[in-house]
Image (cartoon, grey):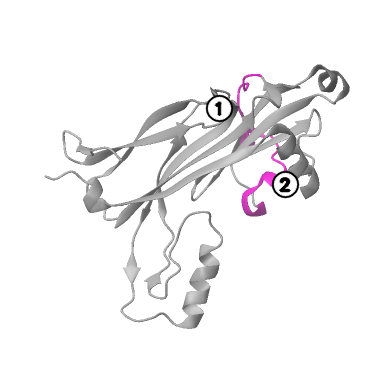
Amino acid sequence: MGKAVFSADRKVVSAPVDIKLVNHSDIGFYVLGAEFHAMGEDVTVSPTDLARSKWREDAEEWARYREKHPLTRREVYQPGKLVAAQPWMPPGNWVEANDESLTRTVVQLPSDTNFDKLTFYATLSLARKDRLVMENFGRPSYSWRGVAVPHWAKVDQKENDAIIQTAEMGENNAIDQYTRLRRRVITYWRFGPHGVDVAPVIAPVGEEGRPFSERTNREVRSRYGLIDVLAGPVEETLDEIKPRR
């Protein structure tokens, strides 16, 4: 977190957030998707322990989300509210071996915001450059314009808005390139109450929407080095974020 500043009319607070990516390995990675989001949270603490039934209910609700929520006997679970969400690295770029990069994004919120704290998350979906050769992503498609989203890619198996990006790819050696079915890299950017979830898949051309077994998914992720990097939660109270008047 950098130093926050007020706008000229003092109605908006802008808080800079730096995201540092360090690749300690001797392998480069393609960036399939990079998402950052901030959640505003209110904190309510009970003066006494919650009833066991209430605590269990909160624990079950907490388990539904990848966000961090309390699992104490006194802090009352309250879902956070999305404050900001955006990509922080362009899909299709790559991370060089033994390299690091720094990205700065800015979170803006009304100066009279009454959240108790802000919580920041950053995610990154990668594929190993020594396992495949990926071309740039083409123009995105949209679920709300009639492009079908596979059932497995829907959040909670419901209808959700999604942006679909596709890139042609080749195998990492000549034998595989000429003997294996041609494949594509597809990413589904799925919108929900907690930012955007990026779901990548590598599938043969014409089979992008077909559900695959868990074993097949594990084999594909292992073969092409698909990994997800998650950072957060990083928490800041509003008193820490807002500049002094």
- Residue 22 coordinates in the image, percent (x, y): 47, 32
Q: Residue at x 19, y 38 (%)?
A: 6
* The magenta stretch spans residue 143: yes
Q: Amino acid at mark 1?
A: Pro
Which quarter of the rendered picture does the C terminus lie within? Answer: top left
Q: Is residue 106 left or right of residue 216?
A: left
Tell me the element at label 2.
helix
Q: Decide if residue 149 is in sight here.
A: yes
Report the number of numbered marks.
2
Q: Residue at x 77, y 27 (%)?
A: 183
Disc 2 or 1, which lies upstream in sequence?
Answer: 1
- Residue 186 coordinates in the image, percent (x, y): 68, 32
- Residue 35 coordinates in the image, percent (x, y): 49, 37
Tell me the element at label 1.
loop
Q: Decide if residue 213 is in sight here.
A: no
**Would you say the residues marked 2 and 1 are in contact, meaning their CB atoms lie under 8 Å apart?**
no
Classify 10 Å Cα crowding around label 2: few (below 14), some (14-19), many (20 and above): some
Residue hosting label 2: 151
Range drawn in magenta: 135-157
Q: Is residue 5 left or right of residue 126?
A: left
Q: Residue furthest right?
A: 179
Which quarter of the rendered picture does the N terminus lie within? Answer: top left
Q: Amino acid at mark 2?
A: His
Classify 10 Å Cα crowding around label 1: few (below 14), some (14-19), many (20 and above): some
- Residue 87 coordinates in the image, percent (x, y): 48, 33
Q: Vertical placement of 120 versus 127: above or below?
A: below
Residue hosting label 1: 91
Q: Is residue 51 left or right of residue 154?
A: left
Q: Vertical placement of 112 versus 53: above or below?
A: above
Q: Residue at x 69, y 40 (%)?
A: 149
Q: Residue at x 33, y 64 (%)?
A: 43
Q: Quadrant of residue 145?
A: top right
